[in-house]
Image (cartoon, rainbow, N blue to C red):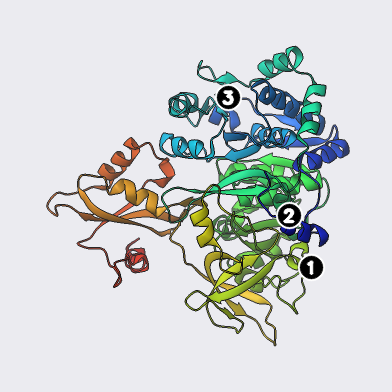
Amino acid sequence: MIPFSAETIRDYTNRGVWGRTTVDDLFRIAVLGGRERLAIVDPPDKQAMTGVAPLRLNWLELDDMVDRLAARFLALGLKKDDIVAVQLPNCVELAMVYLAVARLGLIISPFPIQYRDHELIDLLGFVDARVMITFGRIKGHDHVAMLAGVKKHLPGLKGVLAWGASASEAQSLDAQSLDNLREGVLDRAAVLDASRAAAVDANEVFTITWTSGTEARPKGVPKTHNHWMCAGIACAEAGELRDGEVLLNPFPMTHIGSLGGMFFPWLLKGGVLVQHQPFELDTFLTQLASERVAYTVAPPAVLNLLVQNQALMDKYDLSALHSVGSGSAPLSPWMIRGLFDRYGISVWNSFGSSEGCALFGAGRDIPDPEARAEYLPRFGVKGIGWSSWVAGAQETRLVDPATEQEITQPGQPGELRLRGPLVFSGYWNDPEQTRRAFDADGWYKTGDTFEIAGEGPTPRYYHYLARTKDVVNRGGMKISPAELETLIDGHPKVREAAVIGVPDARMGEVVCAVVVPRDPAAKLELKELTDYLRDKRIAVYKLPERLAIVDALPRNPVGKVLKRDLRDQFAKSA
């Protein structure tokens, strides 16, 4: 499935931006180069979380396990472009699914482990997923039993595959089951033949990830092999990764931060991928020290905490760590300076989204830590040179959304627009949202506000001002207000509701439900509201953690709720 026109593909190919290397090609190259060297490591708390023993595999062992899983896919009758859904925490098995899907020319759609019946029935049906892969239990929740119920609503779903599953509703993916399948039904040559027959093109869709916007349903973002190759190269460059280095991945491997920032740099550099989830600070620091990690990613709040707690940092040998990627929120100059001055750790700043991974503030391009915290590079602007490979291919500009006029002078706020080889082609099966996502000239509208900053006739930087979309960012998990508002409006005590994000010291933001009651005399408590939403079987992380009762919602002259006013009002109380 190729989402781009022949003209676009020809243009980027001729410019040397897109190539012919697929994910499976990249993996096979890494296997040949690594062979019996360690390739991937499970989180130490995997067994407690899932009941499945942790693994440490070298490249040849991983390649063998990928073949076994690919054989299972073939036995199920999966064919090229069929969609494989997966709901797994960061683990060796999740990487195996990505690689087995790539080997056969399938498409993978990863879902957060927090999703429940409400989200899965809708989205699995929306993409017409053929199989769903999970663990029997994750953090005490019976995923097999849940998915057995989900499957009843989805006639197109061939089956549920699970590691560590004891229930009859799932087909086992445990090692013995895969051994028997490979030896009794399909051998390695059959998998190789199927891979060759698929003839996967690097411009074909490899993943459909999900982004929650202001609409009720998360939007599917299809990305090709070439998209991910570009993102991986850009992140590996920004992190100054060297061949064979150890990477620690604490971000859920379901979106751009982990896939582009960890999974693909790992394959490109033939290193060691150490998995981590759920985030736990002592475990994270222990892994950094014991696995001799050279590169990782972390949210700004965690890095701030580490710099403020030197005694904690000094308990661990972090001498191998030379680079950390961060972003999704403004970085603190004192944090970047502190990590570099005390420990020689360089923090690089990034900005982007699933739709268009965009700006990478690497240390060699912005050597001053204070400037790197505050500014991001103006990639793709004539007259400005950068060391990053992606800079020459990605185009950026600021536009006044009211007039659609380009902004070229410092100090004027505008929406960031993107165009280039990292930008997606459009949302999955959603032409209306796709139309709204791009302007008349084909630039992707990020919905984020920046201004131009810097000296001279061609200032070099962008300065982030605000997120103009209403998405709540709870610890890196994006939550759609519209989805929650639709559910909350169904509560018998609620007349109308608005959902906003309010500041939280631990999570960055948490969900606040602002409610106008049907009857002011009928008291509504937060627990009553969350119990009602739990009955709707939504993911726990989406549940409101604040409740505000108001007489009316503020609106503009055409009746639109002014969420900015609500955020200003309730941020203070939060």
Q: Going 59% across and 83% down the picture, which residue do you hit?
A: 410
Tell me: 540 left or right of 265. left
Residue 117 sits in quarter: top left
Residue 504 sits in quarter: bottom left
List x then y, in percent, for residue 398. Answer: 58, 75
**For the residues bearing labels 2 and 3, Cβ distance under 8 angstroms:** no
Of all residues shown, which one is farthest toward the front?
6
Q: Which quadrant, please, contains the N terminus?
A: top right
Disc 3 secondary structure class: strand
Q: Going 57% across and 55% down the picture, which residue do you hit?
A: 299
Q: CA distance from mark 2 to mark 1?
A: 29 Å
Q: Earlier in the sequence, mark 2 or mark 1?
A: 2
Q: CA distance from mark 1 to mark 3?
A: 44 Å
**Residue type, mark 3 in image:** Ala
Within 10 Å of the Cα at label 3, are there few (<14), some (14-19), or many (20+) other Cα atoms?
A: many
Total numbered labels? 3
Q: Which residue is mark 3?
A: 162
Q: Which residue is mark 1?
A: 387
**Residue type, mark 1 in image:** Ser
Disc 1 secondary structure class: loop
